[in-house]
Image: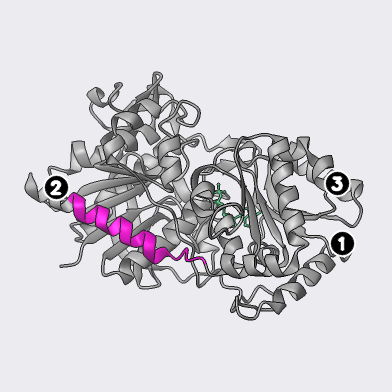
């Protein structure tokens, strides 16, 4: 009998997306399905879902979700995404808003605790309404952190969930879902769970910690990050509990959706190419330079696509920019985020005429054109749970230059290592970054060596299949454990 999985996430491509979680939630359920699992994906019905252009239909199924003292009615909508049943929990008062979690001007939505309490409890009510008795409920990040305590405390007693184990995946420990303790009544969980071993974190409610404390297994998105979050530097206050739960903590590297990210068939590109016939890549570079009104160049074009936040190492780039530009490279950046970085990159366009192209904003198609048109992809993240762009870059023959952290460390092999696919520096400082980038620029001038490197990078396998197999064997292990009890 195939394993039944409910996958709960607060965002998933192509319906609603703010970051890497959406890519994972869009692809992993499909990969698990192709391996024989029966996966149902549950998402909130945001305004973005209605505007996504995907056909999402009402099911006529309604149920009630207790949130604090209120009983909230929820309606289920449905679609199919690559063979996966996707259900959306619709409650406009919570989700019919311009953004998913908050706005740039006003910050997080004031009622996020209530919104995601509703969603997390709604997962169980939806499963009951759909008559799904899951072997696994797999929740993701703080927005669904309450799923595991609800299973342990509230729903595990229900025969529908008596054989259900919980898996919680941390996509980024820096986002924690912290709320004032005075709101605890919203959760409808007994007071005893608000303690050191439960979801209390420095006298506040922490939904991330709810997931860490109550789930049968915890995963995170790369083996290196699974180690890093057990240290003071990257544990964000949770290193203690993660050390304590070390045996239940697993690092599984994300894959990439190879149908979406394939230079041979990518419709966003002006020219297609493959590892065997790479000439189209040169034309993509010329077209990209042209698009940004930049000068033609024989030097490498460095691409960056990112949220413009400290985590991604932009302070290092800012401090070292003169040394970076003195390497003779050109830069194309696509991103949005902190104003000081947006201003900094806008300023570079005038400071280095013809050598820097910048677009502030979010643009999926341009992200593809940059992956194809750049020669080097720069990602000096301070920490990086997994990172997707370095893997997209490999697939597009754009050689990553990365800081050796998290998933960057696990997916990129430095030029001095056997079977190299990129450049990787250890030690987070501007000099190390510039030295490594300089090494890549020098290597670039050796055309046959660079071509061989590009070919090798493009043949790296980062498909979801391999990752999905690891999740599946974790699910199976949890099932075995449960049956032994
Ligand atoms: P994170 O989740 O920390 O933002 P990841 O590398 O894991 O970083 O995933 C980022 C995802 O968002 C990738 O798919 C990347 O291409 C995409 N992305 C980030 N910024 C932009 C942007 N400005 N325009 C288009 N896509 C973007």
Secondary element at tag 1: loop
Q: Nearer the viewer, residue 148 or 92?
A: 148
Q: Position of residue 343 (x, y in %)?
A: 80, 41
Q: Which residue is mark 2?
A: 481
Secondary element at tag 3: loop
Residue found 40% across the figure and 40% down from its top? 226
Query: In the picture, residue 377 is in which quadrant?
Result: bottom right
Residue found 55% across the figure and 59% down from its top? 391
**Which residue sits furthest bottom?**
277
Q: Which residue is mark 3?
A: 326
Q: Are marks 2 and 3 in contact (CB under 8 Å)?
A: no
Q: Is residue 474 magenta?
A: yes
Q: Main secondary structure of the magenta part?
A: helix
Secondary element at tag 2: helix
Q: Can you say which quadrant of the picture contains the C terminus?
A: top left
Q: Which residue is mark 1?
A: 294
| Image: magenta residue range | 460-478
Q: Nearer the viewer, residue 63 or 38?
A: 38
Distance of label 2 from label 3 (alpha carbons): 58 Å
């Amino acid at each position: 009998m195939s394993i039944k999985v409910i996958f709960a996430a607060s965002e998933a491509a192509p319906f609603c997306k703010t970051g890497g979680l959406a890519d994972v939630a869009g692809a992993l359920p499909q990969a698990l399905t192709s391996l024989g699992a029966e996966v149902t994906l549950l998402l909130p019905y945001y305004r973005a879902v209605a505007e996504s252009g995907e056909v999402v239909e009402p099911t006529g199924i309604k149920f009630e979700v207790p949130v604090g003292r209120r009983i909230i009615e929820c309606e289920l909508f449905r679609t199919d995404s690559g063979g996966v049943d996707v259900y959306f929990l619709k409650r406009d008062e919570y989700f019919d808003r311009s953004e998913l979690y908050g706005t740039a001007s006003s910050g997080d939505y004031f009622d996020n605790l209530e919104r995601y309490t509703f969603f997390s409890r709604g997962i169980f009510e939806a499963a009951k309404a759909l008559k799904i008795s899951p072997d696994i409920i797999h929740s993701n990040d703080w927005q669904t952190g309450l799923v595991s305590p609800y299973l342990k405390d509230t729903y595990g007693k229900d025969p529908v969930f008596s054989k259900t184990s919980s898996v919680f995946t941390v996509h980024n420990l820096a986002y924690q879902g912290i709320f004032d303790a005075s709101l605890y009544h919203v959760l409808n969980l007994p007071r005893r769970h608000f303690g050191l071993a439960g979801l209390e974190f420095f006298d506040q409610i922490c939904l991330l910690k709810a997931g860490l404390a109550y789930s049968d297994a915890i995963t995170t998105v790369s083996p290196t990050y699974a180690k890093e979050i057990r240290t003071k530097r990257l544990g964000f206050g949770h290193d203690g509990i993660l050390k304590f739960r070390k045996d239940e903590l697993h690092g599984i590297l994300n894959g990439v959706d190879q149908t979406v990210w394939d230079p041979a068939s990518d419709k966003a590109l002006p020219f297609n190419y493959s590892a065997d016939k790479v000439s189209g890549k040169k034309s993509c570079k010329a077209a990209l330079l042209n698009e940004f009104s930049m000068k033609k160049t024989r030097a490498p074009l460095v691409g960056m696509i990112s949220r413009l936040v400290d985590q991604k190492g932009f302070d290092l780039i800012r401090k070292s920019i003169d040394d970076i530009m003195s390497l003779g490279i050109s830069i194309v950046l696509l991103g949005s985020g902190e104003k000081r970085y947006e201003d900094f990159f806008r300023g570079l366009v005038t400071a280095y005429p013809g050598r820097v192209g910048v677009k502030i904003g979010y643009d999926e198609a341009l992200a593809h054109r940059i992956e194809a048109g750049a020669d080097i992809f720069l990602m000096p993240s301070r920490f990086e749970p997994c990172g997707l762009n370095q893997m997209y870059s490999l697939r597009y023959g754009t050689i990553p230059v990365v800081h050796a952290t998290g998933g960057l460390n696990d997916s990129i092999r430095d030029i001095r290592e056997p079977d190299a696919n990129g450049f990787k520096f250890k030690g987070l400082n501007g000099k190390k970054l510039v030295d490594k980038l300089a090494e890549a620029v020098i290597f670039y001038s050796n055309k046959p060596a660079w071509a061989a490197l590009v070919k090798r990078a493009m043949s790296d396998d980062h498909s979801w299949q391999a990752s999905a197999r690891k999740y599946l064997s974790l699910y199976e292990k949890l099932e075995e454990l449960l049956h032994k009890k």
